[in-house]
Amino acid sequence: MRGCDSRGLFAGGAPLAAQAQLALFTAGGAAETPVGATYQAGNVAAGATLDIRFRARNQGTASITISKLAISGAGFTIVQTPSIPFVIAPGAFQGGYVRFAGTTLASYSASFQINSISVILVATVVNAATLTSRAPALVQMPATQ
């Protein structure tokens, strides 16, 4: 990815000495996991939804303005985020969720972008009977109106 170091950090538009660095993580409780170029959401039962909690963290010394927040692809939508543009102060983060909902048994993908960070999200819809019990890394939530 252009402008990205080995940790997935991107430089903001500030002067070099005070550049903000934006990094994208998934969050579960207090734990954060860095997100790479592709994020595997896993298997989701047909008709269920999966909310993926993301955090955009400013790891630099200057504020960074988030001016692009977009998703394109079937089954994925951005939910519970502030309207753009918004500012993330140095050392702070802004959280939000991407919701996946699919009804047809298939593999789905979408491009998720925050400023210059671009991530491919992947999820697979399966029959509920094929899901095996496992410790949930993410929360599956019933569909809401």
Image (cartoon, helix red, strand yellow):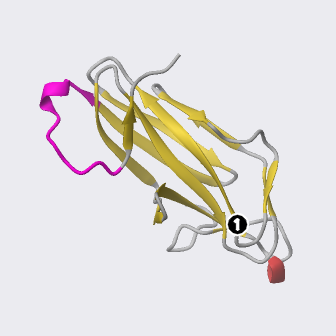
Residue shown at 78% from the left, 47% from the top? 67
User: Extreme right residue here?
Assistant: 15
Circle 1: residue type: Ala
Q: Position of residue 43 (x, y in %)?
A: 27, 37
Residue shown at 86% from the left, 75% from the top? 15
| Apparent side of residue 81 relative to residue 63 in the rendered image (left or right) | left
Q: Secondary structure at mark 1?
A: loop
Dominant SS type (magenta): loop
Quarter holding residue 62: bottom right
Q: Position of residue 113 (x, y in %)?
A: 61, 46
Q: Which residues are magenta?
A: 125-137
Residue 45 in the magenta stretch? The answer is no
Residue 126 in the magenta stretch? The answer is yes
User: Which residue corresponds to mark 1?
Assistant: 92
**Label 1 packing within 10 angstroms: few (<14), some (14-19), many (20+):** some
User: Extreme bottom residue here?
Assistant: 17
- Taking 6 as reference, is 103 above or below it? above
Quarter holding residue 47: top left
Q: Position of residue 13 (x, y in %)?
A: 81, 65
Tally the marks.
1
| Apparent side of residue 13 relative to residue 71 in the rendered image (left or right) | right
| Apparent side of residue 18 relative to residue 28 in the rendered image (left or right) | right
Q: Quarter of the image for the N terminus: give it.
A: bottom right
Q: Position of residue 27 (x, y in %)?
A: 48, 57
Residue shown at 29% from the left, 22% from the top? 46
